[in-house]
């Protein structure tokens, strides 16, 4: 009696399993990594939101790869902007069997994590890492959808020299791969443009008190101060410099060029001129529509990186479609021939994984609003 009952249960279970298996989706994971805790968590969440919006849209439209219905699943991870955590998170994504990764946000996390993805044969598209070294390691897995500091530094220096009439500058960086790398590129270009570099100082990405450096710089009386770092420190730096009576313009890169820097710098935001390593949102082919969708979905304005992470997800899926496979190796093999037209414009890559046609946008702030000053096509 017991064996007969057990047999019936097995048959019934098998009958239920067949239609379920026939209609089951292939769930394919795409990783996203950025700081979701710490001082620049707002930038990390902005990026994650962009990736999430892309995943939800693709799932809503329906995705069929290799004759199977595929459901994408975003695998969001927090590296806290820390290089050691970044490698741990990268290994977790490899273990999670993601087919591609959008990330990391910082250069200082993207570079160490890139070896983990390279060893696993998984494509990594950074939405924000600008340090040239990221794609100069010889890995076939590293890509980015922003310009590099080798482009951003010179564009910022050129604008300072030609449009702002800057003759002397003091340089400060936060000692990260991003901040120091951008400051290095700016310094080289500034000297070539005839700007005299009066001093070079370093702080760190967790600093809160900049009065000693600002006081020293006040005595040097430069026309401008170039700050290499993120908005979490760049904003307070500009604020404290203004409080000490420093009138020099504060120049920053994309890490400073956020919506939140207005809150962090206060009235001193009007003294900031910053660059973004991509086309300005209002100049992006799909920028206005993307901003509308983003704000309707998340009920907040986007910061900086959401359009780049959004397109990065679509680029991975575009490679998946061309490969007609969800196999990471086959997706990776299609990446060099990418020609994707998205929100940020047309994306094609060099043999190193850099954008073939980058752009640098220059902004200022006025009464709490971010104003586009110039776009430099690279």
Image: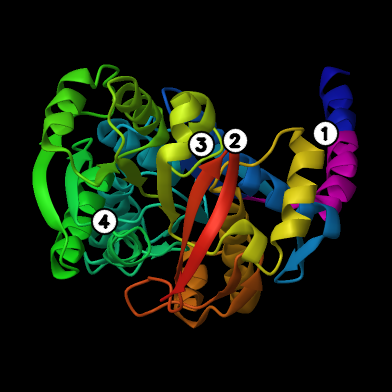
Task: Name the mark nearer the viewer: 1 or 3.
Answer: 3
**Magenta part of the protein: which range?**
11-28
Mark 4 vs mark 1: in front: 4
- For the point 43% across and 30% down, the residue is 268
| Residue that numbered label 1 is attached to | 10
Q: Residue 367 carries which label?
A: 2
Give the Cα distance between marks 1 and 2. Answer: 71 Å
Say which label, 3 or 2, has the lower sequence index.
3
> Is 193 in the magenta?
no
Q: How far apart are marks 2 and 4 (CA)?
A: 23 Å
The chosen color scheme is rainbow
| Circle 1 Cα neighbour tier, 10 Å, few/some/many (<14 / 14–19 / ≥20) | few
Determine the CA span between mark 3 and mark 2. 22 Å
Counting residues from the start of the chain, the first of labels 4 and 3 encountered is 3
- The numbered dot on residue 166 is 4
Query: How far from the left and from the top, in percent, is residue 372?
Result: 56, 57
Residue 249's x, y, as percent? 33, 43
Q: In this view, does 41 lie to the left or right of 354?
A: right
Which mark, by number, is residue 43?
3
């Amino acid at each position: 009696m017991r064996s007969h009952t057990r047999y019936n249960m097995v048959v019934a279970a098998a009958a239920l399993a067949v239609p379920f298996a026939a209609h089951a989706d292939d769930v394919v994971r795409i990783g996203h990594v950025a700081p979701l805790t710490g001082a620049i968590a707002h930038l990390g969440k902005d990026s994650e939101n962009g990736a999430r919006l892309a995943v939800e849209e693709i799932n809503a439209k329906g995705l069929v790869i290799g004759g199977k219905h595929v459901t994408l699943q975003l695998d969001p991870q927090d590296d806290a902007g820390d290089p050691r955590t970044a490698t741990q998170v990268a290994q977790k994504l490899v273990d999670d069997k993601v087919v591609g990764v959008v990330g990391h946000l910082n250069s200082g996390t993207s570079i160490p994590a890139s070896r983990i993805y390279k060893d696993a044969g998984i494509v990594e598209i950074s939405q924000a890492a600008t340090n040239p070294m990221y794609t100069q390691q010889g890995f076939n897995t590293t890509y980015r959808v922003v310009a590099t500091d080798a482009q951003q530094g010179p564009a910022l220096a050129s604008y300072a020299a030609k449009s702002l009439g800057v003759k002397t500058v003091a340089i400060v960086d936060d000692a990260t791969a991003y901040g120091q790398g951008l400051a290095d590129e700016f310094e080289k270009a500034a000297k070539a443009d005839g700007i005299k570099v009066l001093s070079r100082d370093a702080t760190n990405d967790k600093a809160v008190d900049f009065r000693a450096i600002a006081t020293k710089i006040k005595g040097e009386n430069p026309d401008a101060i170039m700050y290499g770092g993120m908005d979490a420190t760049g904003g307070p730096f500009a604020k404290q410099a203004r409080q000490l009576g420093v009138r020099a313009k504060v120049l920053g890169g994309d890490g400073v060029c956020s919506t939140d820097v207005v809150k962090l710098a206060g009235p001193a935001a009007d003294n900031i001129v910053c660059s973004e390593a991509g086309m300005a949102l209002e100049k992006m082919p799909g920028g206005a529509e993307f901003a509308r969708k983003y704000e309707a979905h998340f009920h907040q304005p986007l910061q900086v990186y959401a359009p780049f992470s959004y397109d990065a997800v679509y680029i991975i899926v575009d490679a998946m479609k061309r490969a007609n496979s969800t196999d990471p190796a086959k997706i990776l093999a299609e990446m060099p021939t990418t020609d994707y037209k998205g929100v940020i414009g047309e994306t094609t890559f060099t043999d190193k994984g850099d954008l073939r046609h980058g752009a640098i946008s220059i902004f200022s702030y006025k009464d709490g609003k971010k104003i586009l000053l110039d776009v430099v096509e690279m």
